[in-house]
Image (cartoon, helix red, strand yellow):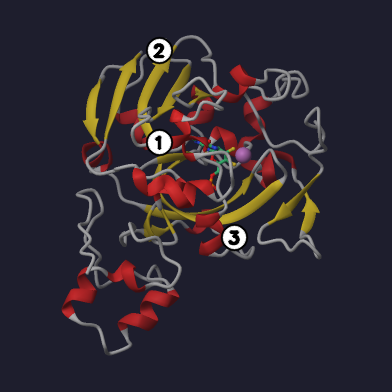
Amino acid sequence: MLIKRRPSWSLPESEVTPRSVYLNRRKFMTGAIASAAALAAPGLLRAGDSPTTTPLTFREAPEYLTDEKKTPFDAVAKYNNFYEFGTGKGDPAKYAHEMSVDPWSVEVDGECARPGRYALEDLLKPHDYEERIYRLRCVEAWSMVIPWVGVPLATVLSRLEPNSRAKYVYFETLHDPKQMRGQRSLFSTIDWPYREGLRMDEAMNELSFLAIGLYGETLPNQNGAPIRLVVPWKYGFKSIKSIVRIRFLEEQPKTTWELLAPSEYGFYANVNPEVDHPRWSQKRERRLPSGVLRPNWMETRMFNGYKEQVAHLYKGMDLAKFY
Ligand SMILES: Nc1nc2c(c(=O)[nH]1)N[C@H]1C(S)=C(S)[C@@H](COP(=O)(O)O)O[C@H]1N2
Ligand SMILES: [Mo]
């Protein structure tokens, strides 16, 4: 029997969690056969669940919900981009369990008053978790609707007290070829670690989110456990996974896909149906799950539908130049 230990930063599940207990688990809980051992590991019994997730306590953030249909858990956790574990969509789900995510710490440095190495629980402790349902639009023209659990990026960054020279924030993913087989691959063209960044005002925007969970439980490793960025108005590659470094910078940092193919991927990477990728159109997207025979195509919206929240950040900028 697999006994799961809750990571110290996943708060104990409370009796009062409103509507946050997902249907499957509720069914199981009222199913009368709940043994004490099973209750200690509730995630184990959810069909299709990842064996490493545990329940989180959170509140819903009503301003960030949507009535769009959520992408089923199975698609969210089995169709991934996480090149540290391979380039195939199924590779992360197959191999990401080889990464150990507890304990986890994040190194904070650069232009701020509180640099240092933070245990993940200390970075998260003073904050309440909330659920937000966001669209995720990959530059490859597929998209999902995902219920994330986490904290606004702005609240975490503010506590680190960036100074007036901090114009950008930069993130790095874990670099550990022993745990990440994609980093051992001789075919990899990426200069590890995976790097991303945001302009400070983008980072402080209300939508920018640090996710520690999805569908009410801690993140499956393949989705970027234990902590990943979610910036829903930008192409998915900006939403960096498994973060181990946060650095405040005066200059714009170089980011992974920009370094790899600067004519195809820019620093801003805002979802924009008017600016095509050099090799394909960005006007439409396939909302997953999408059948081969009946692909679920839909129009892509400016800023992925988040114009109201973010358009002001780019006033006066030529978005074809700053793609
Ligand atoms: N470290 C790291 N972060 C990453 C990636 C990656 O390969 N490595 N892929 C990105 C891309 S291209 C997308 S579309 C999203 C996918 O997130 P998901 O697998 O949780 O849907 O993660 C992004 N974050
Ligand atoms: Mo992507």
Name the residue furthest front: 186
Q: Secondary structure at mark 1?
A: loop
Label 3, label 1: how many angstroms apart (C-alpha)? Answer: 35 Å
User: Where is 29 relative to 283, above or below?
Assistant: below
Residue 12 appears left or right of 28: left
Q: Earlier in the sequence, mark 3 or mark 1?
A: 3
Q: Position of residue 182 (x, y in %)?
A: 48, 34
Q: Earlier in the sequence, mark 2 or mark 3?
A: 3
Residue at 60%, 25% (x, y): give it. 257
Amino acid type, label 1: Met
Q: Quadrant of ligand 2?
A: top right
Could you say which disc has been placed on residue 66 in the image? 3
Q: Quadrant of the C terminus?
A: top right
For discs 1 and 2, the disc positioned in front in the rendered view: 1
Residue hosting label 2? 164
User: How many residues crowd mark 1 within 10 Å: few (<14), some (14–19), many (20+)?
Assistant: many
Residue hosting label 1? 180
In the rendered structure, are the residues bearing label 3 and label 1 in contact, judged by CB atoms less than 8 Å apart? Answer: no
Q: Quadrant of residue 106?
A: top left
The count of marks equals 3
